[in-house]
Amino acid sequence: MALVGGATGMIGDPSGKSKERNLLSEEDLQKNVAGIGEQMRQFLDFETGENSAVLVNNFDWMKNFSYIDFLRDIGKNFPVNVMIAKDSIKNRLDSPAGLSYTEFSYMLLQAFDFVQLNRDYGCELQVGGQDQWGNVTAGIDLGRRMDGKKLFGMTSPLLTKSDGSKMGKTESGTVWLSPEKTSPYNFFQYWVQKVDDADTGKCLRYLTEIPHQEIEAIEAGDPRDAKKALAAHMTELVHGKSGLQKAQAATEIFFGKEVTDAESEALQSIVADVPNAEVQRSALEGDGVNVIDAFVESPLAKSRGEIRRTLEQGGAYVNNVRVTNVDHQITTKDLIGGKMILLRSGKKKYAILNVVG
RNA sequence: GGGAGGAUACCGAAGCGGUCAAACGGGGCAGACUGUAAAUCUGCUGGGCAACCUUCGCAGGUUCGAAUCCUGCUCCUCCCA
């Protein structure tokens, strides 16, 4: 049973947050709810007969509540002294950021969700991340008070790095599940590039369903292979077999040997799955196109100054050959298989310039 | 309602009339070392080849000159009621 927070999303959960959340517009929220629902399909089967997963939206039962009814029916069951004793609230009360009444009320909503799901579906167990502990227990208490039901909760540790910070948040390479936001190739690369050796085992345990014995065997081996295994499992889980294949094909080419005409076929097959841009064939004829212009066309450079710096520092490559001269011209001679040019910034960021016309 | 502070680049935070595209830290990018890891070290980090252009909440004003002073506005925080 997957619950999306169409109602609670309008409030903002203070748990684990150091600042008051910005309220989302109803429109954005609708989009988020729809998007999350879509993504759940990758992980849960909603059409498997009797035992199908269920997707519920708490807006469906919250929308009919009047403020008065809510206070009488739900609020009455929440002793404030218990509420303010919860870490999620206490931490915020102690911090300079404070806490609005709105966020303070969040736990009542989530608690009631649990009760509602118990009533509608016989749901008895709520599972969430560690930061949800307070909200989960609030629901257990509310079930007991309102319906005399015995409900249960389970939380899992949050995924943190070995230094204690949250994973995947601050890095520019924030990963998204949606292939629109993070291509399968980039998703795969995320696990290879951004996970510390020390965190690989933890990720394998938390995020994959590989048996523990196998994980131990993986850990005993080369850490590079461990990360690739992690990347492969995650990519397959999120993007399916075909996504994984494309990601691996691209990885093979980019992080393999020199790129020549021989790889043009393979490159062609992955072009859509890696960052790419188009150039007119005519532009490459004659004197060709300046390297800087070429990079600026690609997603690798945001500004001319940026790529100029990269060039000067020796971080720019055309077809895997380092280019440091800012006046370098790219011409038809540089085309791989007569069709494309491989641009690279730094050690591991690639883009393909696809020739058209 | 009364009072006191504040709003600076991706984030945090200095600057309080010229030498400010703006110290410092974090983050990010690139290089070296490696293993597409971590740690470490180095360089860069508004746009532009440059002249120069656009930035310090918003709108005006003072001044030869404003992130810095004045006026109004918006938003935030705190204290009192």
Image (tube, coloured by chain):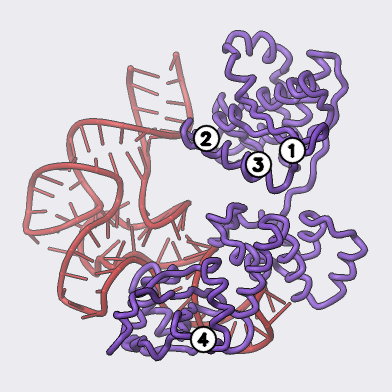
Chain colours: A purple, B red
Marking on residue A16: 3
Q: Are marks 3 and 1 in contact (CB under 8 Å)?
A: no
For label 4, the crowd category at 10 Å Cα-Cα, with few meaning under 14, some 14 to 19 and many 20 or more, is: some
Task: Tell me the chain of label 3.
Answer: A
For label 3, the crowd category at 10 Å Cα-Cα, with few meaning under 14, some 14 to 19 and many 20 or more, is: some
Residue A156 to residue A110: above or below = below
Q: Which residue is mark 1?
A: A47
Decide which of tag 1 and tag 4 comes sooner along the chain: 1
Locate residue B20 relative to residue A47 in the image: left or right: left
Q: Give how far apart the Cα atoms at labels 2 and 1 are.
A: 25 Å
Locate residue B35 relative to residue A156 in the image: left or right: left
Task: Tell me the chain of label 2.
Answer: A
Question: Dot 1: what SS?
Answer: loop
Q: Are marks 2 and 4 in contact (CB under 8 Å)?
A: no
Question: Dot 4: what SS?
Answer: loop
Q: Which residue is mark 4?
A: A320
Disc 3 residue type (three-letter): Gly
Marking on residue A29: 2
